[in-house]
Amino acid sequence: MQTTTTTMREIFGEPIYTYTRAQAIEDGQLIDVSTTAREAGIVWPVALTSTAWADCVEWTDATEARKGYTGQSESGRLWDVCWMLSRVVLRAARQGLQASPAHPMYVELLRTPREGRGVRPRLVHLKFIVGPDDTGRPCITVMMPGED
């Protein structure tokens, strides 16, 4: 019995348009946080969507002044995201699970919202997937639950 393998290109032809992960990082749609993620124990490249960054990491002097206190920083908020992500990734790996585009995983963390004057931390859920980067190697993309 002979089997033939047909590729997607053979079925559909050449792609009309592609948008690579590198282009998304260059355009600011994704923010590469791999260095901090590596410090937190994640070996694969990690990027946050600009929406996830704005909600969970971004913190300006104007935000600090409006909140009326000190103690938040982008580096600290980024560390919190990466550390909590690393805990979920490690636990999933121990259980033989892996997030994929078809099966995302979620991480929870407390973060002080940028909006308003309140300083009480709020629970936020972030979705993440493991998929191929532009060269086919695994990478992690972290996003808000409604993003894909």
Image (cartoon, rainbow, N blue to C red):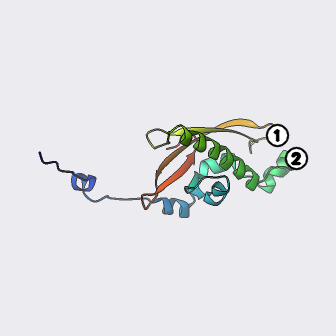
Mark 1 Cα-neighbour bin, 10 Å: few <14, some 14–19, many ≥20? some
Horizontal relation, residue 82 to residue 133: left or right: right
Give me the residue at 44% from left, 60% from top: 134
Q: Position of residue 101 (x, y in %)?
A: 45, 43
Labelled disc at residue 119: 1
In terms of sequence position, does the residue under pointer 1 or pointer 2 come before the other?
2
Labelled disc at residue 38: none
* Residue nearer the viewer, 137 or 52: 137
**Residue position for label 2:** 68
Horizontal relation, residue 89 to residue 73: left or right: left
Mark 2 Cα-neighbour bin, 10 Å: few <14, some 14–19, many ≥20? few
Horizontal relation, residue 141 to residue 6: left or right: right
| Callout 1–callout 2 Cβ contact below 8 Å | yes
* Residue nearer the viewer, 117 or 96: 96
Q: Position of residue 93 (x, y in %)?
A: 54, 42
Q: Position of residue 98 (x, y in %)?
A: 49, 42
